[in-house]
Amino acid sequence: MPGSWFMRFIILWAFILLGLMLIGGFFMFRKFLKRLPKADGKSTLDWQEYYIQQALPLWQDEQRTLLNELVEPVPQLFRDVAKEKIAGKISELALKEKATTLTLDTIIRGYIIATPKRDHKFLIKKLNEKNIDLTPYEHLLDRTQNNPSP
C-alpha cells in the first residue's frame, strides 16, 4: 500500500494542473476576443491604443499621478491593464468632447465608466479617500452592492 498515497498525489496534482491551465486559458481567450476586429476593422484594444495616442498631449504629470493613485486598489498583477483601460476611456471622453486639457471631471467620469460595476465599492472608497464629491457622478455609479435592497 505504499504506492497508493503516491497515486493519490499524482491524481491530485493532475487536477491542480488542469485547473491552472483552465484558468490561464480563460484569461488568454478573453485577451484574444479583445484583439478580434469589430465591424469597423479595429479591435477594442486597437481603439484603446488609438485614443491614448491621440490624447497623449493632454496628459500632464499631475493627471498621470492621479491615475496612478486611482488604480492603487487594483492588484499589482492587473494594475497595468487596468491603468491602460482607464486611460483609454478618459482619452476617449476627452477627444469626443474636444477638450484642450484633461480636467478632474473628465478623469473621474472615465475612471467610473471604465471600472467594472462589481468594483464600484472600491472605486467609491478610493474617491472618498481623495475627498472627491461623488454627487455629480451618481448616475454613473452602481451603489446596489453597498445598499442591498430587502
Image: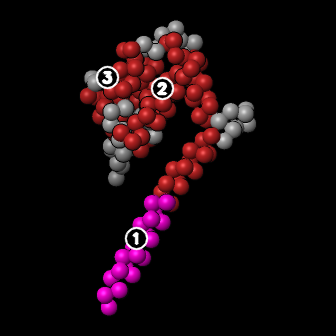
Q: Give the amino acid at mark 1.
A: Trp
Query: Which residue ends up furthest to the bottom in the rendered image?
Result: 1
Q: Residue 136: in sight, yes or no? A: no
Would you identify the image quadrant in which residue 64 lies?
A: top left
Residue where numbered disc 1 is placed: 13
> Where is residue 94 shown, x and y percent of the image?
53, 17
Using the image, tell me which numbered label, if any, was put on residue 99.
none
Q: Which residues are magenta?
A: 1-21
Give the alpha-carbon distance from disc 2 to disc 3, as whole Å.
19 Å
> Where is residue 149 shown, x and y percent of the image?
36, 49
* Residue drawn at point x = 61 percent, y = 29 percent: 47
Residue where numbered disc 3 is placed: 132
Query: Which residue ends up furthest to the top in the rendered image?
Result: 100
Q: Nearer the viewer, mark 1 or mark 3?
A: 1
Query: Which residue ends up furthest to the front in the rendered image?
Result: 2
Residue where numbered disc 2 is placed: 87
